[in-house]
Image: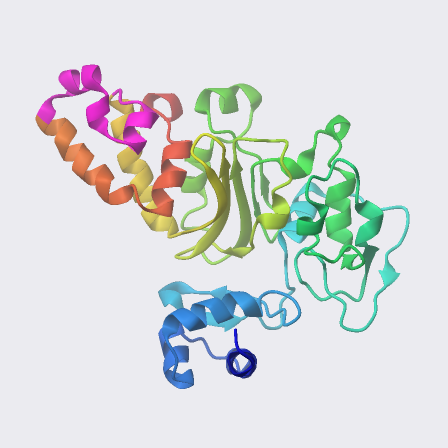
Amino acid sequence: MSEEQSANRAVRLIAIRDLLCGGGAYTAGEMAERMVVDHRMINRDLLDLQGAPLYTPIIQWEGGRYQVIAFRECLTPADLIARGLDLEPLDVAPEPTPIGAVSAISGKPLKVGYRAADFVTPAMNDAIGLFHNSLNGWISDNEVRLFKNAAPKLGNMPSRSVLVFEDGSYYWPLISGASAGEKGRPCWSDLVRAVWPERKGERMVMILSTDTKKRLWPRAEVGALGQHTPIYGYDGATGMAQVLYLDWARMLACLDDVETVYSLGFSKDAIRMSLLDNWNVMQQVGMRETQRWERALADWRPSAEFWVAAMIAQKKEQTR
């Protein structure tokens, strides 16, 4: 990036932040029109604004409109998870931080905190990446609580697959409906339906992972349940390890289709790739019906909604 491009970008970031801080809500297209730039550039700028050092809490509402979260607590995944787990504070109180200090993990502004270097352990595979090259920086009280409760003897609670809302409502679901019933925990397939639309618009964090040993919360995002809901997905078998953005209502429609097909006897691998791969099931269901569902799934497969639906789908007789 040239010096002129860097200068233009800096001016644009400040202009966008000032515009959103004015109390209005704008689409990326509307902001691009005001700035006379491509809307794709605005999308990148919005991500940059939410990181250090310009940490600006932005939320996307219905209709794709963005707005700064004003007069509300700026929440990170660590804040929500620590609140949901009701984790105890450390015995040692946090220190006052220098003016302008932000969390080395989330970029959230901090008035008090702990030194990141004090929590680096030999077990951390990528401490430099975790703390964004700021080992001498600071981390928040809630981030420290998650670190201190990550020991296997404590159940490694921060590494769970979870859905947590800003009011502290905490859900620890299982993918398998049968296992969820045996352990008295919610099943993902039921839970994602139960929270919609009653909790639409509420801020939340969701981590859907098949590995309960990985520290994934630093990579997750807080967002509103709705048309642009961030979830962190991790699954080694499908090569997933990133934040996905879901339209929750579309995801539920996709889940209905996937569970219908799954209940016909098709495997999840066939659902993900091609129903025509399940020859024996196809013969039982019939070629015409199989092709009809294959066309429906083909439309869903490229979407983030499909990845979640295929992960959590249950055969209908197992869940309801």
Give the residue at the far front of this rendering.
2
Q: Closest to the observer: 97 or 260?
A: 97
Q: Going by the image, does 43 lie left or right of 268?
A: right
Q: Closest to the observer: 40 or 22?
A: 40
Q: Going by the image, does 131 lie left or right of 71?
A: right
Residue at the image position 53 percent from the left and 33 percent from the top: 173
The quadrant where residue 103 appears:
bottom right
Residue 159 rendering spot, x and y as whole percentages: 64, 37
Residue at the image position 48 percent from the left and 52 percent from the top: 230
Q: Which residues are magenta?
A: 265-287
Quarter in which the C terminus is drawn = top left
Indicate how the structure is coloured in the image.
rainbow
Assign the magenta stretch its main secondary structure. helix
Residue 89: tell me if it is visible. no
Residue 130: tell me if it is visible. yes
Q: Is residue 122 shown in magenta?
A: no
Residue 43 rendering spot, x and y as whole percentages: 44, 68
Residue 47 rendering spot, x and y as whole percentages: 52, 65
Residue at the image position 46 percent from the left and 39 percent from the top: 240
Please tell me whether residue 29 is drawn above or below residue 141 in the rendered image.
below
The quadrant where residue 313 appears:
top left
Residue at the image position 83 percent from the left and 70 percent from the top: 98
Residue 41 rendering spot, x and y as whole percentages: 43, 72
Please tell me whether residue 250 is drawn above or below residue 18 in the rendered image.
above
Please tell me whether residue 227 is drawn above or below residue 40 in the rendered image.
above
